[in-house]
Image (tube, rainbow, N blue to C red):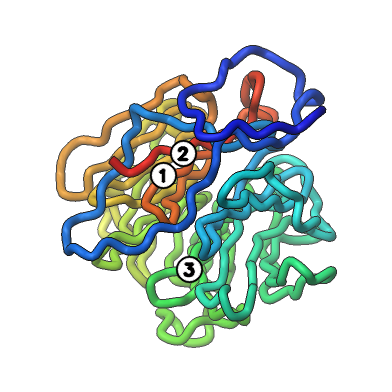
Amino acid sequence: MRTRLLLATAGVAALTACSSAEQTPRAESTVPSAAAPPASAAAPAEPDLSNPQTLVTGLEVPWGLAFLPDGGALVSERDQGDIRQIPVGGGDPEKVYEMPGVDSGGEGGLLGLAVDPAYAENKLVYAYVTAAKDNRIVKFTLDDKSPQVIFEGITKGGRHNGGRLAFGPDGMLYVGTGDAGDGAESQDPKDVNGKILRLTTDGKPAPGNPTAGSPVWSMGHRNVQGMAWDADQKMYGIEFGQDTWDEVNVIEPGKNYGWPTVEGKADDSRFVNPIVQWRTDDASPSGAAIAGDTLYVAGLKGERLWTVPLGGGDPKAELTGKYGRLRTVAVAPDGALWLTTSNRDGRGDPKSGDDRILRFAAG
């Protein structure tokens, strides 16, 4: 299909049914360059969810999303094992890396991405990959033919592979893993499944972890696919429930979040209660991001973007049903909110242009 670039268009693309074979990734809008930090101490503006801009269409199950220093981004395609670069200033998404050894199937494949905090100097990227025998974390530059495995042995499964990567404000690499369908692993402190891990950039247990020599930061998780930090460096983790409750948790080192013994708020002194819970039909949450004083949570089955006011107040559902399944949400260097769909993952109803990336500029 002939590629095209439409500059500075905004709004919603027409959502008419089509087959996935007809899709070719292409740019629909220009990505602005990274903005300079504001000089004032005023709180950063929150994104305007009433004014969507379609950045890219025709992606194949976008999963990981990581920003480059110039304001461009890398996005992983789960089933293809490809990484595409979305450039600033215009241009179609370019395939810049093909991850070797990806064993896609079920919920596995090429999942989370993270860009090294020192990317401007070392050009390093990190990825969470489902391989033939396990889930693993690799690091590489876009010129490397063979990525370096820095952490392996995370049990893989047809579902609950976790997969989110994020660098915390402390410069350490945080990893959300799933229980791979075996809830007992979540309660085993020596097992890395059903956990949030905290690693160095070499894949070693980070100094200051609750148990010296262990990569485990927190335990008792079912399937963590979202992590975010607020301005005070408080960490939030997003949790897929089973049949009853999805969760938003404040993550503290060494704490146990209860799965599979409890789901949702249990008021059990052994476990930490979530600060927010939703019925699984209303959320099935994946990615998370914080802009200003609001936590944004992307819902797959719920097909909505949840906004959670961190200063108090009730969560609110936005964009319900407009774009289908929502996988990843992230804040760009210019303060805009980016949101990816996941309608071609085998559980959605793909329309013309899926899967896409939407952008909401800071208001």
Task: Describe the element under mark 2 as helix, strand or loop.
Answer: strand
Task: Describe the element under mark 3 as helix, strand or loop.
Answer: strand
Q: Residue at x 25, y 53 (%)?
A: 44
Q: Is residue 179 visible?
A: no
Few, some or many residues within 10 Å of mark 2 (<14, 14–19, 20+): many
Task: Describe the element under mark 1 as helix, strand or loop.
Answer: strand
Q: Is residue 259 visible?
A: yes
Say above or below: 227 vs 150. above
Q: Residue beneath label 1, please?
A: 337
Mark 3 or 1: in front is: 1
Which quadrant would residue 34 be assigned to in this image? bottom left
Q: Which mark is residue 210?
A: none
Q: CA distance from mark 2 to mark 1?
A: 6 Å
Give the position of the N terminus as an image quadrant: top right
Which quadrant would residue 254 be assigned to in this image? bottom left
On the picture, is 217 further left or further right than 101?
left
Out of 229 and 151, give the one closest to the viewer: 229
Say above or below: 361 vs 225. above
Amino acid identity at mark 2: Arg
Mark 3 or 2: in front is: 2
Q: Position of residue 51 (x, y in %)?
A: 37, 29
Q: Residue beneath label 2, please?
A: 359
Q: Residue at x 63, y 12 (%)?
A: 16
On the picture, is 231 further left or further right than 215?
left
Amino acid identity at mark 3: Phe
Q: Residue beneath label 3, please?
A: 167
Mark toward the start of the polypeptide (2 vs 1): 1
